[in-house]
Every structure is written in structure tokens, then in C-alpha cells.
Amino acid sequence: MDVVKLLPDSVANQIAAGEVVQRPASVVKELMENSVDAGATLVKVIIRAAGRQSIRVIDNGCGMSESDARLAFEKHATSKIRCAEDLFEIHTMGFRGEALPSIAAVAQVEVLTRRAGDRLGVAINIEGSEVKRQESAECEVGTVFTVSNLFYNTPVKRKFLKSDETEIKNIIQEFQRVALAHRNVSFMLYNGDDIAINVSEESFKQRIIQLFGRNRKTFGQDLIPIETDTTIVKIEGFVGRPESAGKSVPQYFLVNNRYIAHPYFRRAVIQAYERMIASDAVPMFFINLTVDPSTIDVNIHPTKTEVKFENEREIYSMIVVAIRNALGKFNISPSLEFSNEGNDFEIPVFHNGNTSSVPSMPKVNFDQSYNPFKTVDVHEKPDTRNWESMFEGLHRQSSAPIEQTLDIKVKNELGESIWYKNRWLCVALHSGLAVIDVPRALYRIEYDNIISSDCRLHGQGVIFEEILEFSDEDECIFTEISEDLREVGFSFEQFAPRMYRVIEEPVLNAGRIDAVDFINQMIAGMKCGEIDIHRELRLQMADRMALRVSQNVKPIFDKIEREELIAKLFSSSNPNNDPAGRQIVKMIEL
């Protein structure tokens, strides 16, 4: 007896729907993308009961003819592909076809559509892949899709839907992804009769703010533009300032204006923020990559969110460089103003409409007893006898915040504009006080100094013998990076096939890391293509050297030394955070 049989189309479509239509958010995504491809400039999405009851998508696109509307629900129907080569030249999203049979297989679907040149449109009703009604109808130009009772004929799928709150969250996420990629289209999302999101045609930055910064007035100030254009890829978009990083922040990659999830490129973004943010934080980013469609493969997953790139390693490096350049160029930090001179001015005001009042010429005040030839001891120490009492309670071990323990009267009673106590430098600004954590500031300054220097670091003999043993592949990589390892202070001796003895390690290492583990990590990074080994080794050693300097802070009583430290900090690559991502400067409004 034969046991292999062809499945009915209705059953085959239900199986296919399991890959494409996983939840109500999947329907929203597919229908929104269809509307975009139809040339719509306005797309409305209306959901009821978190999409379980109905999902309606209304657009003002080009609409469909009666035959196209009917054929769009047939299996393998599409408006884009005529031959296999067309798979690698697709620039659009969906356009009435690929997902519609899957949606119609597990829901009750009604489509109402009309083209601009047609007097009447067409209405089609389909349930479980079966056409129930098809007739002419009066309607507006464009298309209205209504998907009701999702998974009504597959109760197991419906049973595993999450709570309404979770499903709405997923719908909003898909809505945001499509809306972010198509800023030339206005989108509206209704939850029942209430409008949840309304975004109009705007610039990319404004679209980001509309979607993700509605409840944050300063959200736009955290966005730093990035842009680079090469023969391989064009990178454009925005990344967040280091201080905006957190455990849950928006992260979006677009490729040719299509949302993708790409963990490998996400690691490139995180690498660009290395030692600028806390280890448990991640940066936000909104990055669009424009590439030749023939160099990517978007057909490795039914939802099209996973993409293979022909030049992944090259693009990885370009993302890192583009973000680091942007962070360096647009670094925003508090400005230290030590004087009001030349900064503040007043415009004369005519009171009570009296135009006869003429402003007088400004006068310059100067010290007539000043002697420019008087000898001054530049090393003279300022009088520090009275200021210490004003900082009582401002200690490292104090459990109260700095804002609570700092006496606000300090600014008015002291003649100097910079004060030092324990590990803190307090600097008077127009807007209040900037409190600087000195060890962290030194950590940042010394780290940048070492990174900018290209000198060879010294090594010292190891106390306990450490042995490296490699596979054939790892030994090839080790040979490739051995010179870079020597530049940062390592030295080796081969004593057997694929076995090496560590003779010297960096002076500044001082047992802080296990040399064998450290080198194996570098080799693993090279195998994954994730790191620039020369730079990574110098970063690791710079971190250890700078950390040691910052742990041996001595009191800074000399005013000139204080000003020099502040000047170096605010000319560093990131005055806001030390290499470990911790905050350096705290502003206190007075």
C-alpha cells in the first residue's frame, strides 16, 4: 500500500503559514510592507483585541486589478520574480503575494481594492484558503486588508499566543521597524479606537525621535550622526552618546531600507564603544547599510530578517571605524568656563518707550597699581588654611550623594574657582559645579596617552613557567600575531612542536591576567574575524597601565596642576566616561 501522498493545498498553506505567520505581529509586518511596495504615502493599521479579533491595514497605494487581487492569494504568486536571477535583485519588500496565501490559510481575510483608472474596485473574501466571495465594489483608490479571527482553524497556534500586552508589544515593534525604514511614508497605528503611534513624513532623525523619543525631551541630543561611503557599502544613520547606553535601548540595523537582525554587526557596534560604556550596558544605534543587492542573500529565513553578506568582515571593520570617527568628532561634554570675561553681554533696553535715552559708552575697569614687571613665584602655593572645613562630609566613604553633602556656599565664599578634596575636584561654572572624580579622570587621560603613543612596551621575566600549546590552525595564527605580542611586552621560546614557553610578559601586567588565557583569547578573536589584533593588544596593555596610574593618586594642592588635569581631561577622547565606562564628571546645579 502506498503511503506517500500529496497534501491538499489548504494543508500545505497552513504548514507554510507556520513559518511566515507566527503571531499577529507577523501579519502586521507583511501587510505594511505590501502597502509600502504599492507606493502608499499613508498607511493606517487598526488592531482589535491585540490582533486576535482583527487586523486592518488601509493604504492609499496603487491598488490592484480584479485578476491581480485574486491571483495574489495563490501559492507562489508574486509580482517581482520571473527567473531565479531576480532573487538577487529585489529592492522592494513584498508586494501582494508571497505572504498572502499563508495569511489566508489561517484566518478570514477580506480585501477591498481599486486602481486609480478603474471605476469600480473589487471585494474578495477568503477563509482557510477557500474563496467565499468575489465581486465588484465601490471603494477608494488603494487597498484595505482585513484579517479576522487569526488561527481560527489552527487552535493549537491560537492557544500559544501570549497575553494581550505581549502581543501588542510585538505589533508595536514590527510597526516601528517598518516605519523606521520608510520615512517618506506616514504611518498610523490604532489600538482599538485609540491612536497609539502617529508618524509623518520626516527626516531619518525626526523619524527616530517620533518613534522612540516621544517621552524623552532630550532624546534627539543623544543622537550622533554617522556616515561613510565606500565601493562596498554606504553606512549612514545615528548612534547614541556613550552616556545614553543602557541595558535596554533601541538597536536597529537596516539593509537597503529593510530591517535585519545581525548579531555579527551588532558586535562591531559594541566594539566601537569599547571602554566608553559600562560592561553591562549596550549602545543604542539606528544604522542603514546600502549595498548592491547581488552581494547579499535575503532568502535564508522566511521572515527575511536574517541576511548573508558577501563582504561581512570588511563591512564589520567599516562600521567600527565609522562609529569611532563619529564619537570622536561629535563628542559633547561640559565646557569649563573659568571666567565671565568676554562671555556675557547685555543689550541696552529702552524703558517705557522712552527713545530719548541714549546708552552710554562702556568703560573698561583696570587696576592702576598693576606692575607688569613685578616678579611672581609661579610655584607659590595658594592659602589652603580655611577651605578644608567647607568640604566636611565630602568623603569617599560617605553614603550621601555629592549633591547633598556639598555646601552650596562654597562657590560664594572661596576666591578660587577650583577646589580639591580627597578624590574630588570641584570646578565653578556658570550653571553650577562640576565635580570631577580624579582617579577616573587620570584613568582616561593616561589611557588616551598610551593609545596615541606607538612606542614598544617593555617586558619582564615571568616568575612561574607558563606553557602555550597550539593546534596546527592556532599555531599559524600565533605566528601571524607574534610580532604584535612582542610589541606589547611578550616574549616566547619554542621548545617542542606547537609548544612555546612564555619568557617575558608586559611589565604592567604584574599578574593581572593569565598570559596563556590572554593569548588564546586573542587567537579566538582572530579566528572569528572580530578584532584588529594590533589595536586590541595595545588597548589591553593601555588599560592596565592607565589603571595602575589611577590607583596611585596623590593630593593635588597646586592650582596649576589642577588646571592642567582639567585641560587634559576635556581634550581627551571621552571626558564623560573612563575606559571602564564609569562617569567622570557630575554636574550640580546651584
Image (cartoon, grey):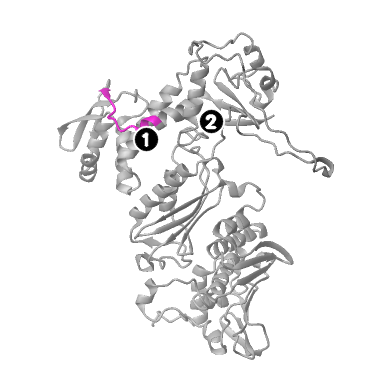
Q: Which residue is mark 1?
A: 539
Residue 546's x, y, as percent?
A: 41, 27
* Residue 244 image label: none
Does the CB distance between marks 1 and 2 fall below 8 Å? no
Badge 1 crowding class, 10 Å Cα cut-off, few under 14, some 14 to 19, many 20 or more, is: many
Q: Residue at x 46, y 28 (%)?
A: 568
Q: Is residue 134 left or right of residue 578?
A: right
Residue 450 shown in magenta: yes
Question: Looking at the image, is 137 positioned above or below residue 553?
Answer: below
Residue positioned most to the left: 496
Please name the amino acid that badge 2 sits on.
Ile
Pick the front one: 300 or 204? 204
Which span of residues is magenta-colored? 449-460
Q: Is residue 338 left or right of residue 546?
A: right
Q: Is residue 443 left or right of residue 335?
A: left
Q: Earlier in the sequence, mark 1 or mark 2?
A: 1
Q: Secondary structure at mark 2?
A: loop
Q: Secondary structure at mark 1?
A: helix
Pick the front one: 362 or 404? 362
Q: Which residue is mark 2?
A: 584
Q: Residue at x 34, y 44 (%)?
A: 531
Residue 282's x, y, as percent?
A: 51, 44
Q: Is residue 63 left or right of residue 440?
A: right
Question: Looking at the image, is 109 positioned above or below residue 218?
Answer: below
Question: Looking at the image, is 374 positioned above or below residue 272?
Answer: above
Residue 27's x, y, as percent?
A: 58, 69
- Quadrant where the C terminus sits is top right
How many marks do you count on the picture?
2
Residue 3's x, y, as percent?
A: 40, 79
